[in-house]
Image (spheres, rainbow, N blue to C red):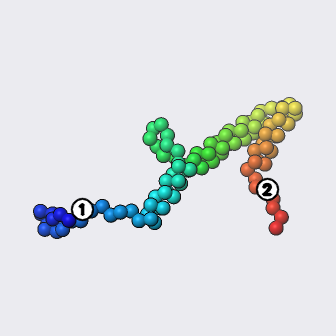
Amino acid sequence: MTQSPETNILIDTEILPTTPTTSKFNQKHQEFLDQYIWRSCCGMKLDKRVVLFFSQFLIAMMIISFSLYQLNKSDDCNHNQLYLGLLTLIIGIFLPNPKVK
């Protein structure tokens, strides 16, 4: 214990030992950070799940917009089959599977 000169208050300078619960919490927190957080080259911290979701969403929206543009522009039925197939593939990926209860 030391005494602060300006306030005459005793200050505890001992460092409290970590308890098992705080060390377990710190371990779980570190496991979470290791599993779900990416550190970028610029020093930013990013959640892996969010990056994965938005990259998949962006690629799907690019494919959908390209297919719709080509369907609108094309007059040939053979090319339309390809773009309709791409559209149904993307829609099939995003829609959930039906489940029987």
Left or right side of 2 for 87: right
Q: Which residue is mark 1?
A: 13
**Quadrant occupied by the C terminus:** bottom right
The image quadrant that residue 71 belongs to is top right
Instruction: Point out which mark residue 48 bears.
Output: none
Q: Which residue is mark 2?
A: 97
Residue 87 in the image: state x and y as whole percent.
Answer: 78, 42
Q: CA distance from mark 2 to mark 1?
A: 60 Å
Kind of residue sitting beneath label 1: Thr
Q: Count all numbered tags in the image, as a single digit.
A: 2
Instruction: In the rendered view, tell whether residue 33 sits above or below residue 74.
Output: below
Q: Is residue 82 left or right of residue 43?
A: right
Q: Secondary structure at mark 2?
A: loop
- Say which label, 2 or 1, has the lower sequence index: 1
What percent of the width, then of the height, locates residue 1? 20, 65
Amino acid type shown at disc 2:
Asn
Q: Is residue 72 visible?
A: no
**Closer to us: 14 or 46:** 14
The answer to whether residue 60 is seen in the rendering is yes
Front residue of 80/51: it is: 51
Residue found 51% across the figure and 58% down from its top:
28
- Front-most of 90 and 33? 33
